[in-house]
Image: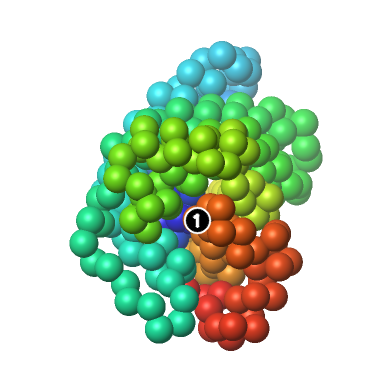
Amino acid sequence: PSSPSPIHPCPLAISSPQVRSLCSPAAGSSFRFPPGLARRGRAAAGGRAGMGASGGGEDKPFNFLQILCEGVIAGGAAGVVVETALYPIDTIKTRLQAARAGSQIQWKGLYSGLGGNLVGVLPASALFVGIYEPTKRKLLDMFPENLSAVAHLTAGAVGGLGASLIRVPTEVVKQRMQTGQFRTAPDAVRLIVAKEGFRGLFAGYGSFLLRDLPFDAIQFCIYEQLRIGYKLMAKRELKDPENALIGAFAGAITGAITTPLDVLKTRLMIQGQTKQYSGIVSCAKTILREEGPGAFLKV
């Protein structure tokens, strides 16, 4: 769930990878969405390496606007549903990652900041999938069949980069509310801007990209490649439960890989004016020196 997750594999706009790992990436997952939704898009694209319609018939023309609109609607809906369902898990993860050695974890207010977060999750998730799906389809048409993984990696990274403009401010406000710094989202935005300037809403942007772009790229690549292989073996379209299992598996692997980066992102986003860390390297060195390597694996 934070991240890294939470508008994604629902490629959710969920900033947290752990949260997104519980969804399926086609949408995703995060949401970032639901894998079942991507199936319809691939069928329209004509199918490549088992990814097209089961009939494998004639290719249909690439309709960018239609794919964009479908992705925006599916991504936004999936992002809101998944974020709401998994928000308590994301809150616990954020508090664990923010806690220093010996600190006590608060178990109250697990839905703190949900309302304000959904305001950002909806457009971020919609934007992610709206970018991911048409980009993926276009790249699959351009690249040879044996480079489909590159197309999925690239599309995931491009979608994550575009959605980051909404994800990061949403994540900053959400995580500071989850750690008890503010009571309402409007107050959080107003006070952050007043004390830290507009740049305060983009605190930890570099660490967010360092975590989220690899997460989105790797998660979707694993998800799409597993689907291709499974469909070739099964010789049929996958059912929704199968898509969900593949998405969860891809998200779990990617979340485990990117957890250390997610810890850095959380610490940089919630530090506010304390400026305990001057950047990603400073944050990593301080955590390693004061808390040990185990602190990078807090989920």
Q: Quadrant of the C terminus?
A: bottom left
Q: Is residue 75 visible?
A: no
**Residue 61, percent across and down?**
62, 15
> In the current view of this chain or complex, which residue is farthest to the left?
108
Question: Which residue in the protein does label 1 denote?
Answer: 270
Identify the secondary structure beneath mark 1.
helix
Q: Is residue 117 above or below residue 131?
A: below
Most foreground residue, 13 or 130: 13
**Residue 136, percent across and down?**
64, 34
Q: Is residue 84 visible?
A: yes
Q: Quadrant of residue 138?
A: top right
Q: Is residue 240 above or below residue 248?
A: above
Q: Residue at x 25, y 50 (%)?
A: 111
Q: Is residue 9 above or below residue 122?
A: below
- Judged left or right of residue 272, residue 81 is left
Q: Residue at x 40, y 40 (%)?
A: 188
Q: Quadrant of residue 80?
A: top left
Q: Amino acid at mark 1?
A: Ile
- Judged left or right of residue 97, residue 116 is left
Most foreground residue, 116 or 15: 116
**Residue 52, percent across and down?**
55, 34
Q: Quadrant of the N terminus?
A: bottom left
Q: Residue at x 42, y 51 (%)?
A: 176
